[in-house]
Image (cartoon, rainbow, N blue to C red):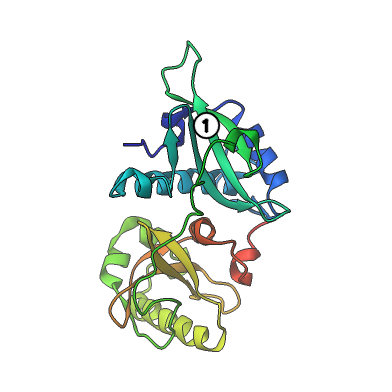
Amino acid sequence: MLTTDLFDFAYVPDWYGQLDELSRVALPEPWRFKKPANVTKNQDTPILERYIHMIFRKQCIEFNSAEDDRKGAQFFHVENERACFHTGLYNSRYKGIYAFFDRNHKKDSMLEWYFRGFCDELSPWLRYIQPLPHKPSYYTAKRGAGFNPDWPIRVNVEHILGDTENLERIPAKIRKAKNLPLLFETAVELGRRRAVVEPGLVVPQGYQGKIQYLLPVYLTNMKKPDLVMTLEVMDGYYMGHTCLTLEMAYLNARVVARPLVPWLTELVK
């Protein structure tokens, strides 16, 4: 069994330097927010850092759940003196970028592995690994290959408004409105109708190995969403029972693919 925390799995030297190098090698992409809601220690590549941690966790879970070693190696290669996984990122030659580890021989560290860095398939580090792990992917529920705006959305308003974290993500100026349940359900339905007219408005996110969807919810401003509703794929409809901030939505969406929809891209630089 692999631990799902990168820093529990391996000794990682110069972590921020490694991320900076990865951001230079990978296809160009914004890796930080314009106006971050929270200050992070890593101010240059916080989105990339979170992405790598999430992909590492996902691939370890898939490896641990695999029926046998051969299937497990599709997610994470761990054998003898080497370990690696596909980051889901690509370089300028459109070659996949891998995270590579070898055995940790540092006497002052109890961790089994040592993170060497990021590389593509031509690196000497990967010379003796074949086949290489697959690109991370998510299971798409049957009949849910893409968001279907014609499906109804059932909103668990009682759960959302009764949960402190969800409630705090709703704009303060309407948080205590007596008709908030109606306002919220109306905004979600309006978002669904908007998705009919604007294909691509709703974006996927990965959750527990499966695809969910992120619907922007416009409560106080029709030009900028106030928050985002997560939609779980059910049998012929979607269930909404969690709200996210826009930054949270971007981070979750990026685990699946680089967001290109304007309501998310305007957050980053």
Residue positioned 51% across, 43% down in the render: 130
Q: Quadrant of residue 199?
A: bottom right
Which residue is painted at 72% across and 44% down in the image?
24
Q: Quick check: can you spot residue 39?
A: no
Mark 1 residue element: strand
Measured from the top left, where is residue 128 in percent x and y? 55, 35
| Category of crowding for the residue at label 1, using alpha-carbon neighbours closer than 10 angstroms: few (below 14), some (14–19), many (at least 20) | many
Quarter of the view holding residue 143? bottom left
Identify the residue at horizontal 31%, vertical 49% (top origin).
66
User: Would you say residue 196 is visible in this rendering?
Assistant: yes
**How many numbered discs sit on the rendered protein?**
1
Residue 215 is left or right of residue 163, and the answer is right
Please, is residue 44 above or below residue 177 in the view? Answer: above
Q: Which residue is mark 1?
A: 101
Residue furthest to the top = 107
> 204 and 172: which one is in front?
204
Rendered-image quadrant of the C terminus: bottom right
**Quadrant location of residue 268?**
bottom right
- Give coordinates of residue 84: x percent, y percent: 50, 39
Instruction: Tell me: 68 left or right of 101.
Output: left
Q: Who is closer to the viewer here, 60 or 226?
A: 60
Q: Position of residue 226 (x, y in %)?
A: 51, 68
Q: Nearer the viewer, residue 251 or 99?
A: 99
Quarter of the image that includes the N terminus: top left
Q: Amino acid at mark 1?
A: Phe
